[in-house]
Image (cartoon, rainbow, N blue to C red):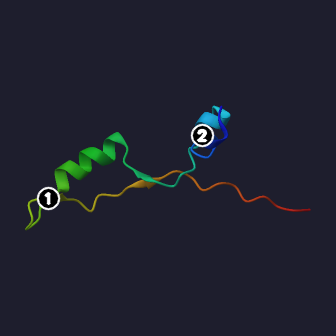
Amino acid sequence: MAEAHLAHQTSYTRTGKLNMLNRKPYRSKAQKALARNTASKGADGTHRSTAPVSFHRAPKQQVSA
């Protein structure tokens, strides 16, 4: 691969493993259903819900000996 393209690779394309520790919020199927049931329409026409979201677990801290 050309050197210019290496800078644009993701960790998935470099290692072949998905990084599940990205800490982005997500909702499970049950949380999505709760969000749909509790959503209210705002003044600007968007639906908002205060239903909980989950986060991927934080990476383990390495302990130096």
Q: Is residue 44 above or below residue 24?
A: below
In depth, the one of 30 and 9 nearer the eye is 9
Side of 49 relative to 57 (left or right): left
Say which quadrant the C terminus sits in. bottom right
Residue farthest along the right direction in this orientation: 65
Q: How far from the left and from the top, in percent, is residue 20?
A: 56, 44
Side of 36 relative to 28 (left or right): left
Residue density around tag 2, few if under 14, some if 14–19, many if 20 or more, within 10 Å: few
The residue type indicated by label 1 comes to Thr
Q: Count numbered badges in the picture.
A: 2
Label 2 close to label 1 by CB (< 8 Å): no
Circle number at residue 32? none
User: Which residue carries the number 2 mark?
Assistant: 5
Secondary element at tag 1: loop
Secondary element at tag 2: helix
Q: How far from the left and from the top, in percent, is residue 29?
A: 33, 40
Q: Quadrant of residue 10?
A: top right
Q: Nearer the viewer, mark 2 or mark 1?
A: 2
The residue type indicated by label 2 comes to His
Q: Earlier in the sequence, mark 2 or mark 1?
A: 2
Q: CA distance from mark 2 to mark 1?
A: 40 Å
Residue density around tag 1, few if under 14, some if 14–19, many if 20 or more, within 10 Å: few
Q: Residue at x 25, y 50 (%)?
A: 34
Q: How far from the left and from the top, in percent, is residue 50?
A: 27, 62
Q: How far from the left and from the top, in percent, is residue 45?
A: 8, 60
Say which quadrant the N terminus sits in. top right
In depth, the one of 23 and 50 nearer the eye is 23
Q: Is residue 36 above or below residue 43?
A: above
User: Which residue carries the number 1 mark?
Assistant: 46
Side of 57 relative to 41 (left or right): right
